[in-house]
Image: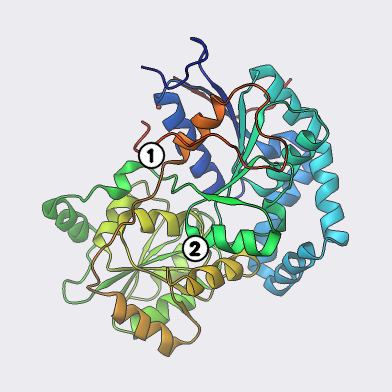
Amino acid sequence: MPPWPRDDRRPRVLVVSGSVGAGHDGAANELAARLATAGAEVVVRDFLAAVPGAAAHLLREGYTGTVTHVPLAFEFLFRRLERRALCWQAERVICARAQRTVAAWAAGLRADVVVSTYPLASQTLGELRAAGRLPATVITYLTDPAAHVSWVHPAVDRHLTVTAATAAQGAADYGLPFTVAGPLVPVRFSSLPSPDRLAAVREVLALPRDRPVALLVGGSLGLGDVVRTARAVAAAGLTPLVLCGRNDRLRRSVARDPRAVALGWRTDVHLLMHLADVLVQNAGGLSFTEALVAGLPTVTYRPIPGHGRANAGVLDAAGLAPWARTPEQLAGSLHAAVGRARAVPALPDPAALVLSAAVAPPGGPAPGRPASGRPVPGGQVLSGRATPSGRAA
């Protein structure tokens, strides 16, 4: 039986992501798959397709270049955004340029719900909702453990977070309600592979049997000082298994250390997480969420500036991932994590919350207020039809 009582029309959901790194797209695609399996009609769009080409290039390449080459500048810009000064105004200009296309996406689908998994998309949708140009319910799903000003808009109907730590921090800092919605990662991350399969992967990767394994991640772009982190992990007595993403230069640099195993882009990260003893991360986005679902203990070390440091602070304060600030602290945190029981928290399903918003009576919650209906009970929502990204005509 379909979960919507109004009529036999399937709920229509527009998901707006942002092709900066892989975390925003990963959450968007997983949500779309679950909603489509539940029978909803789903379209996924890339926010960067709604802005002029120069702005899209700035958002994508400017982010990577600044974090890599001038990290202090990125930290400065991130902090200035919170003051809603010049940087904030520049962001608002970009969002304003996107409004027409994003509104056309929603109108073309006749969307019941629009979900954002990218901060600037949230700002654009919030402005459309506040101006009365978007009748659909608007939901933001935060892919970061730390809420920041770009994620939050008072006219968005609901702000969803992965964990209670983010919900508490967001509510305290911005005075709006946040809802714990749970992770958006494929179910394979929660499925324990057989010992034989893990042993086969370990053999293929030529991992030493007498040393615990630390899985190092720097996102799909391989950002941050991953090489120095790998050396510190090896010095602590663990084997660094380094995911370099699409960063071939990083992979070659890591491979020069015979103690480390350098990998490029992988589609079997779920197996590597069940093989490893601990995750070492520097950003706190999708990789942390995947590790949470896999029950893999996580340690933060040398976080990237801006949202990376903000995420590290929230996770550390909540006891979800210690932030090691020195090589000695890193070694202590790694050895404390090795052998720790893999506890996977019971969390709700974001797709169920989105469906509950899609079936809310017409004239639902007012802008800036949380949805009033009781969420559909959690449980895996498995994939009608997900439409590839593209720009509205």
Asked whether, in this view, residue 247 is left or right of residue 171, the answer is: left
Q: Residue flagged by tag 2: what amino acid is it?
A: Gly
Q: Nearer the viewer, residue 68 or 78?
A: 78
Q: Residue at x 19, y 50 (%)?
A: 193
The crowding category of the residue bearing disc 2, from other C-alpha atoms within 10 Å (few below 14, some 14 to 19, many at least 20), is: many
Q: Residue at x 77, y 38 (%)?
A: 51
Q: Residue at x 56, y 62 (%)?
A: 168
Q: Residue flagged by tag 1: what amino acid is it?
A: Gly
Helix or strand or loop: what does disc 2 sit on?
Answer: loop
Q: Nearer the viewer, residue 179 or 234?
A: 179
Q: Where's residue 254, x and y in %?
A: 43, 70
Whether residue 9 is situated above or below residue 207 in the rendered picture: above
Q: Quadrant of residue 52?
A: top right
Asked whether, in this view, residue 63 is left or right of residue 229, the answer is: right
Position of the N terminus, as image quadrant, is top left
Position of the C terminus, as image quadrant, is top right
Q: CA distance from mark 1 to mark 2?
A: 31 Å
Q: Which residue is mark 1?
A: 378
Q: Nearer the viewer, residue 160 or 368?
A: 368
Helix or strand or loop: what does disc 1 sit on?
Answer: loop
Whether residue 211 is situated above or below residue 66 in the rendered picture: below
Q: Is residue 21 visible in this depiction of the protein?
A: no
Is label 1 in contact with label 2 (beta carbons under 8 Å)?
Answer: no
Choose the circle earlier in sequence order: 1 or 2: 2
Q: Which residue is mark 2?
A: 218
Q: Where's residue 359, x and y in %?
A: 53, 24
